[in-house]
Structures are given as structure tokens and as C-alpha cells.
């Protein structure tokens, strides 16, 4: 009688049974692991949702703080900056056009050292190089307000409606791409708005901004001392003065004297973030 095949058969049956038993024993463990992974995934999703809710709440709180501190507005009849709450009326706003041309970063550093702020109105054609984009990012990161001064500084009344729209929206896109925020203020070149440009500004939820005084574009004041003197002694220097300046060498040189002179006369150099848009 041949016992070897019988022994082999029995051995195979035993091994098969052991394997099945082992698989059966592992099934509850696998189920427990799957349940644990599901719980961990649900917990992670809940944590992410909670963090998102907290982020949204923080944004709302920040927006509420901003709204509470926006206690001035632009009077679009005379372009003065006027209080809309019980705050200091003796303020002056500094605005710098044609940024970032040659001196914007130096001017921003001067203002930062003096602990005052300004609106830098940018022309989009200056933002086509990495160097100028970096300068804009730097001044935005320093806390300065960035305004829209059109792409090419063309006279808007001379353009078609489509061209006007592109002049404005192109700068908004560029500034937002570079700084993360769209401009809140718009100043037309030469102060020349059209009904159409005003409608675009309104659609974009921006504030129109012109000026009440400005001298650095006039030949007689294109040096440090004359510019500082005329600015500080102008008949248009009054409560809510909206001072126009440009990215120019002589303006950069006179800037510190202008700021100190304003403060000596009792003016608060207004942070534009306090202006409602």
C-alpha cells in the first residue's frame, strides 16, 4: 500500500485549512484598520472645515476693523479729504503719481523713516519688467496704498471707450497679480475723467481721486527748496489738502522737508487706508 500520496494529501489539506484560518483571523483586524482610517479621515476633514471657518471668521473680523477705521472720505466736488466721524479734520494726504519710475522706492523709504504714508499711483507700462514689479511689491509690503493711474498715461477723452476700459482694467490686473490686492483708488492722467471712465471705476468699486494742490510739474518748482516752500505756503494748503506729487528727483529731495513742514504746521499726514472707497 502506497502511503506517501495519502500523507501528501493530508498535509495539503492541513496547510489549506491553516491558510484559511489565518485569512479568517486577519479579516476582523483589516476591518478595524479600515474603520480607524475612516475615522482619521473624517477627523482630518472636520479639522480642515474648522480651520476654513476660522479663516473666514478672521477675514470678517479684519474687514470689520478696516471699516471701523475708514473714517474719512474723498469729497468729489472739490477733492478734499473730509472726516466722516469725530476725528481730526486738520489732515493732508500725500499722493505720488507715475510710480514706479525712477525714485519710487527711495521716496517710499523716506516716508517709512518719517512714519507717514501715501498713495502711490502706478502707470502700468512701468510694470513690464521684473525689477519694477519687485519695487511695486516692496512698497505694497511696506504698507503703502497702491492706486491706478492707467496703463500708458494717455488722455482718456482722446481714447475710445474700449481703449479707456483697457487702460484701467489692465493696471488693476497687473497690480493684483503683483501685490495680491486690486487698487482702491483711481486717478486719471491730467485729472481728465470721462463719463465712461467714471462708470468703469464705479463698476470696479474704486474711488475717484484728483487733487487740491500740486506744484512739482511746474518748471519754477523743479528743485528742492522752491518746491518745499511753495507746497508749505500755498493758499491751497488747508484742512483736507490732497497733495499731488510725482516720481521725480526734485520731489524726492524735497519730500522730507514737506512732511516735516506739514507736521510743524499742525497737519496730520493721513494714512490713505483710513479713506473710504
Image: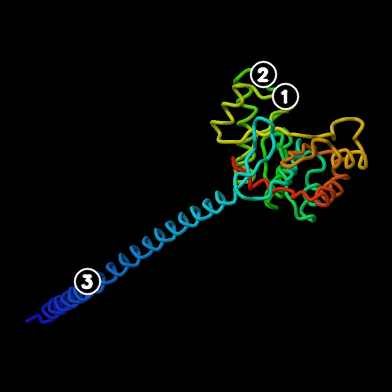
Reading the image, the residue beneath label 3 is 27
Give the label, 1 or 3, closer to the camera: 1
Dot 2 alpha-carbon crowd within 10 angstroms: few under 14, some 14 to 19, many 20 or more: few
Reading the image, the residue beneath label 2 is 159
Reading the image, the residue beneath label 1 is 154
Dot 3 alpha-carbon crowd within 10 angstroms: few under 14, some 14 to 19, many 20 or more: few
The spot of residue 134 in percent (x, y) is 71, 46
The spot of residue 146 in percent (x, y) is 67, 42
Relative to 224, does residue 29 appear above or below in the rendering?
below
User: Residues under labels 2 and 3: Cα distance?
Assistant: 76 Å
Out of 120 and 216, give the one closest to the viewer.
Answer: 216
Relative to 15, does residue 80 appear above or below in the rendering?
above
28 relative position to 132: left or right: left
Q: Are marks 2 and 3 in contact (CB under 8 Å)?
A: no
Where disc 1 sits, the SS reads loop
Relative to 100, does residue 199 appear above or below in the rendering?
above
* Residue extending furthest toward the left: 1
Question: In the rendered view of the protein, which quadrant contains the N terminus?
Answer: bottom left
Identify the image's colour scheme: rainbow, by chain, secondary structure or one colour. Answer: rainbow
Q: Which of the two labelled residues, at mark 2 and mark 3, occupies the earlier sequence position? A: 3
Where disc 3 sits, the SS reads helix
User: Residues under labels 1 and 2: Cα distance?
Assistant: 8 Å
Amino acid at each position: 500500500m502506497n502511503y506517501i500520496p495519502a500523507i501528501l494529501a493530508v498535509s495539503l489539506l492541513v496547510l489549506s485549512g491553516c491558510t484559511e484560518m489565518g485569512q479568517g483571523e486577519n479579516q476582523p483586524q483589516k476591518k478595524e484598520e479600515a474603520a480607524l482610517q475612516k475615522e482619521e479621515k473624517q477627523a482630518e476633514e472636520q479639522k480642515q472645515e474648522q480651520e476654513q471657518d476660522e479663516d473666514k471668521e478672521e477675514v470678517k473680523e479684519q474687514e470689520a476693523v478696516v471699516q471701523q477705521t475708514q473714517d474719512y472720505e474723498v469729497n468729489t466736488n472739490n477733492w478734499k479729504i473730509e472726516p466722516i466721524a469725530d476725528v481730526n479734520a486738520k489732515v493732508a494726504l500725500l499722493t505720488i503719481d507715475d510710480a514706479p519710475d525712477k525714485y519710487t522706492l527711495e521716496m517710499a523709504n523716506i516716508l517709512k523713516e518719517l512714519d507717514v504714508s501715501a498713495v502711490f499711483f502706478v502707470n502700468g507700462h512701468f510694470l513690464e519688467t521684473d525689477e519694477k514689479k519687485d519695487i511695486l511689491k516692496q512698497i505694497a509690503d511696506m504698507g503703502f496704498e497702491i492706486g491706478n493711474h492707467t496703463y500708458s498715461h494717455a488722455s482718456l477723452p482722446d481714447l475710445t471707450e474700449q481703449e479707456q476700459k483697457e487702460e484701467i482694467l489692465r493696471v488693476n490686473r497687473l497690480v493684483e497679480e503683483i501685490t495680491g490686492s486690486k487698487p482702491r483708488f483711481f486717478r486719471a492722467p491730467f485729472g481728465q475723467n470721462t463719463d465712461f471712465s467714471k462708470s468703469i471705476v464705479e463698476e470696479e468699486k474704486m474711488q475717484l481721486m484728483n487733487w487740491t494742490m500740486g506744484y512739482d510739474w511746474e518748471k519754477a518748482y523743479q528743485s528742492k527748496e522752491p518746491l518745499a516752500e511753495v507746497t508749505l505756503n500755498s493758499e491751497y494748503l488747508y484742512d483736507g489738502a490732497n497733495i499731488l506729487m510725482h516720481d521725480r528727483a526734485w520731489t524726492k529731495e524735497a519730500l522730507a522737508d514737506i512732511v516735516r513742514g506739514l507736521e510743524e504746521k499742525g497737519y496730520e499726514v493721513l494714512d490713505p487706508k483710513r479713506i473710504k472707497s
